[in-house]
Image (spheres, coloured by chain):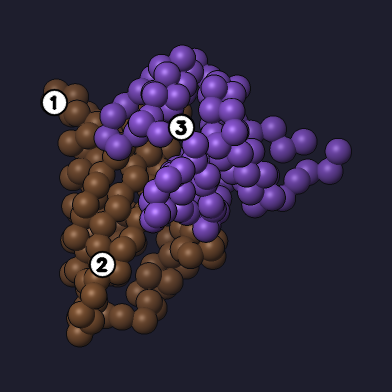
Chain colours: A purple, B brown
């Protein structure tokens, strides 16, 4: 298969991540690994199980992420990728959306 | 020398970076390398010379970054560090500050 454009890979990853977050939050487990770390509002959370426990215990259930920007760049020697996302988070029953931004660093991405 | 706390290293790096940005923007050259990449509002800029040319050609001269949050986490096998900064950017002569966020990924940091 032809090598994909990193920007296209990043955009697809971001759409998949937030679609999973909004529709099946426990499914985010498939996007983290044992060595993954999530820093959430200053708190460092290590490992897929702890990360999913944190994300599923956030004080809201229904939510919808609307993506404004996706920036990516290659990182490191092993085809890693750094992705920076910004957007709005709409919570059910809330009039105003929250602004959010998130960074994702994958140390090795299979572009094939 | 004792090993430093990564959060303290990140905070010191951020303070140094934005102090240099605000007071001696060409001095940022010392904080990038030939293989460094800057993604700036969607534009990918490679190499220390191009990065500094971009940063020194921004359409404002006097500015002051006020940092709101600094999050960091270790990354990769070679004591790398991922730093996520958010804050406000006050431009000379402008009433309202701009919000900004920036990510810095260092593949290898000397904590010693």
Q: Which residue is at a point 62% across and 44% down the rendered structure image? A: A15
Q: Quadrant of residue A77?
A: top right
Q: Which residue position holds label 3?
A: A61
Q: Residue at 38% x, 39% y: name it.
A: B82
Nearest to the eye among marks 3 and 1: give it: 3
Q: Residues within 10 Å of mark 2 (few under 14, many from 20)?
A: some
Chain letter of mark 1 equals: B
Label 3 sits on a secondary structure element that is: loop
Q: CA distance from mark 3 to mark 1?
A: 48 Å
Q: Nearer the viewer, residue B1 or B95?
A: B95
Image side of residue A23 versus residue B87, left or right: right
Cα distance, mark 3 to mark 2?
34 Å
Quadrant where the image shows the C terminus of chain B:
top left
Query: In this rendering, do the residues under marks 3 and 1 share a single chain?
Result: no
Q: Residue at x 38, y 29 (%)?
A: A58
Is disc 2 placed on a helix, strand or loop?
strand
Q: Badge 1 is on which residue? A: B1
Q: Residue furthest bottom?
A: B93
CA neighbours of label 1 inside 10 A, class few (<14), some (14 to 19), many (20+)? few
Q: Which residue is mark 2?
A: B89
Q: Residue A78 appears at what percent x and percent y?
A: 59, 33
Q: Is residue A75 above or below residue B32?
A: above
């Amino acid at each position: 298969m032809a090598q994909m454009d990193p920007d296209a890979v990043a955009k697809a990853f971001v759409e998949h991540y937030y679609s999973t977050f909004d529709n099946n939050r426990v499914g985010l487990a498939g996007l983290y690994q044992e060595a993954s770390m999530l820093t959430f509002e200053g708190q460092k959370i290590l490992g897929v199980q702890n990360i999913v426990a944190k994300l599923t215990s956030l004080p809201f259930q229904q939510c919808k992420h609307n993506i404004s920007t996706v920036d990516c760049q290659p990182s490191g020697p092993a085809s890693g990728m750094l992705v920076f996302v910004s957007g709005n988070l709409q919570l059910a029953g809330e009039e105003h959306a929250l602004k959010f931004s998130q960074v994702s660093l994958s140390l090795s991405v299979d572009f094939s």
